[in-house]
Amino acid sequence: EDVERKIRKAYCPRVPEVAARSEEAEAMQLVQDELMNPCLDYLQHILFGQPGYTFSANGKVYSRYVDARAAFLSGEISEATLKDRLIEEVNKLLDPVRTHFAKDPFARDLLAKITEWKKESAPPPARVAKLTLQPPLAGVAFVVFAPLPEDFV
C-alpha cells in the first residue's frame, strides 16, 4: 500500500539537524519549524486539522497536537508507534475515497483515464533549462510552469 510505504520511509527526527540550510530553502518554508519532521506535519495538519480529532498512542489519548508532539519528542511515543498510527489514521481518511472510485462507474472510468494519461506522459527532459528573467526581479521569485488544459472531462 502506498500510504504505508511512504510513511514507513518518511524522515522522522526527534531533534533538529545542525546542517545549515540555504536561504532559498528557508524562504520556501511557510512556518518556521527547525525540526522539519514530515510525520509530525501530517499529524498536525491532516489529522489534527479535523475538528475534534483525538490521537491515541500507547493507551493515551491526545486532544491537542502540541501534547502529542511533546510526547513524541520526549520518547513517550516511539517513531514506530507514531508511523503505525499515522498509517492507520490516513488510511481511515482515504477509505471513503477508495470506495467511491471502486464502486462509482463514472469515477472508476475517470481514474482509469488519468492512470492511462500518466503512463503516456513524456519522459522527463535529460537536462534542466535555467531561465533568466529580463528585467531581473528584486528578491526571490518562485514560478510554476504547467501545461494549458487541452481536454475537458
Image (cartoon, rainbow, N blue to C red):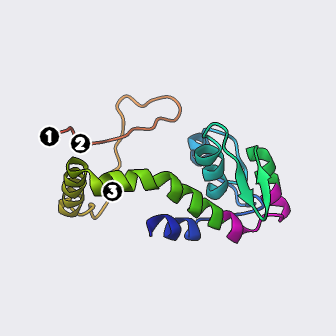
The reply to whether residue 22 is visible in this rendering is no
Between label 3 and label 1, give the one nearer the viewer: 1
Task: Say which residue appears at 50% left-offset and 70% top-offset.
Answer: 5
Q: Is residue 49 above or below residue 67?
A: above
Quarter of the image where one finds residue 48 = top right
Between label 3 and label 2, give the one nearer the viewer: 2
Cβ atoms at labels 1 and 2 below 8 Å apart = yes
Question: N-terminal of the two: label 3 or label 1?
Answer: 3
Give the number of callouts.
Answer: 3
Cβ atoms at labels 3 and 2 below 8 Å apart = no
Residue, disc 1: 150
Instruction: Give the numbered dot on residue 147.
Output: 2
Q: Amino acid at mark 3?
A: Val
Task: Say which residue appears at 37% left-offset and 28% top-offset.
Answer: 135
Residue, disc 3: 128
Quarter of the image where one finds residue 52 = top right
The question of residue 42 being in magenta is answered with no
Label 2's element?
loop
